[in-house]
Amino acid sequence: MLTKKRRRPPVNVRKDCKDGYFNYYLREARINCELTVLKLSERTGINSRLIYAYGRLRCFPPQKNARKIARVLGVRVEDIFPETIRELTLDVERERKKKQRIICLGSN
C-alpha cells in the first residue's frame, strides 16, 4: 500500500524577519555554503537543536556560538545575526513570557 507524502507548507521567509520570525540571513548563508542544519552542527560542535532554535528566533546565540557559526559559514557575525534580529528575538521572548503569565494566572 502506497502512502502519500505530506507536503510541508511553505516557510514564511522575509528579509525584515518581522512577519515570519525567521532568521533569513542565517538561512541564506547556510544554503550558500550548501550545508544542512545537521552538517553545520557537526562542523561547529553546536547541538543541531540550538542551531534550529537560532534560525527560528527561539533564542539568540551567545557570542561564542555566533562566532563559531560565522567562521564555518565564512561570514561576519554581524551579517548573520544583525542587531535587529537580536531585538526581534527579545520581543518574541517577552511575548512568550507574557502568554505564560496569562495562562498561569488563568489556571488559579
Image: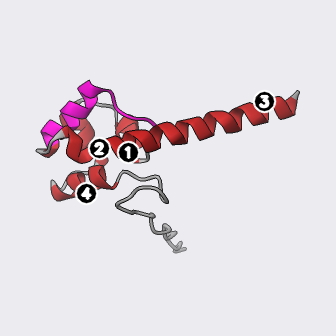
Are discs 2 and 1 less than 8 Å apart at CB? Answer: yes
Give the residue pinned by disc 1: 85
For marks 4 and 3 on the same chain, the one whose residue lies earlier in the sequence: 4
- SS for callout 1: helix
Question: What's the magenta region?
Answer: 58-72
- Whole-percent x and y of residue 23? 36, 51
Q: How crowded is mark 3: few (under 14 residues within 10 Å), some or many (20 or more)?
A: few
- SS for callout 2: loop
The answer for how far apart the CA atoms under marks 4 and 3 are is 38 Å
The answer for how far apart the CA atoms under marks 2 and 3 are is 34 Å
Mark 2 vs mark 4: give the one in front.
Answer: 2
Are discs 1 and 4 less than 8 Å apart at CB? Answer: no
For marks 2 and 3 on the same chain, the one whose residue lies earlier in the sequence: 2
Which kind of residue does numbered mark 1 sit on? Ile
* Dot label at residue 104: 3
For marks 1 and 3 on the same chain, the one whose residue lies earlier in the sequence: 1
The answer for how far apart the CA atoms under marks 1 and 4 are is 14 Å
The answer for how far apart the CA atoms under marks 2 and 4 are is 14 Å
Q: Nearer the viewer, residue 39 or 31?
A: 31
Which kind of residue does numbered mark 2 sit on? Pro
Residue drawn at (82%, 30%) of the image: 105
Query: Quick one: quadrant of the N terminus?
Result: bottom right
- SS for callout 4: helix
Residue drawn at (51%, 74%) of the image: 2
Give the residue pinned by disc 2: 82
